[in-house]
Amino acid sequence: MSVLNPCMSCGACCAYFRVSFYWAEGDDAGGLVPAALTEPLTPFLRCMSGTNQKVSRCVALSGTPGISVSCSIYENRPSPCRDFAMSGENGIANDACNRARGHHGLPPLELPSPLLRSA
Ligand code: SF4
């Protein structure tokens, strides 16, 4: 049986946190992340455009958080996005995930539940 991954209808983390990472992850420095979608932050850090502002929303996020979303650069997304775990993944809660969800009016992902796992 296939269970939809909650992230596919969430996207809260992509519209809440500042997504910053080492500048050389950009494709203008040998990395994968499209540099055109980033902004300089410090001499060593850059961030996804749209995430360094009071009302944060990554420029690469498509769709509506809480309804249906996707990352337009999924294969080339930066390390913080790759490392960020959905709360409940591998049975481990992630308060940051649930904080972002709460900001968008979404309920926390509870533990433990097989529904929290993608199939
Ligand atoms: S790059 Fe993709 S996964 Fe990362 S914050 Fe932006 S939309 Fe979300």
Image (cartoon, helix red, strand yellow):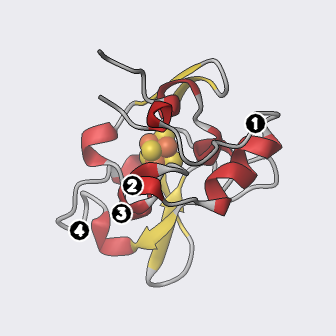
Label disc, if present, on residue 107 of the rendered structure: 1
**Which of the two discs, 2 and 3, labels the residue nearer the N terminus?**
3
Q: Nearer the viewer, mark 4 or mark 1?
A: 1
Few, some or many residues within 10 Å of mark 1 (<14, 14–19, 20+): few
| Amino acid residing under circle 4 | Ala
| Amino acid residing under circle 3 | Ser
Real-space CA distance between mark 3 and mark 4, rounded to the nearest whole angstrom: 15 Å
Q: Quadrant of residue 80?
A: bottom left
Real-space CA distance between mark 2 and mark 1, rounded to the nearest whole angstrom: 19 Å
Residue 74 position within the rendered picture, expressed as x and y whole percent measured from the top left:
32, 39
Q: Nearer the viewer, mark 2 or mark 1?
A: 2
Q: Which residue is mark 2?
A: 90
Label 1: state its secondary structure: loop
**Which of the two discs, 2 and 1, labels the residue nearer the N terminus?**
2
Q: Which residue is mark 3?
A: 79
**Which of the two discs, 3 and 4, labels the residue nearer the N terminus?**
4
Real-space CA distance between mark 1 and mark 3, rounded to the nearest whole angstrom: 26 Å
Label disc, if present, on residue 29 of the rendered structure: 4
Q: Nearer the viewer, mark 1 or mark 3?
A: 1
At horizontal 64% and vertical 44% (from top left) the residue drawn is 110
Label 3: state its secondary structure: helix
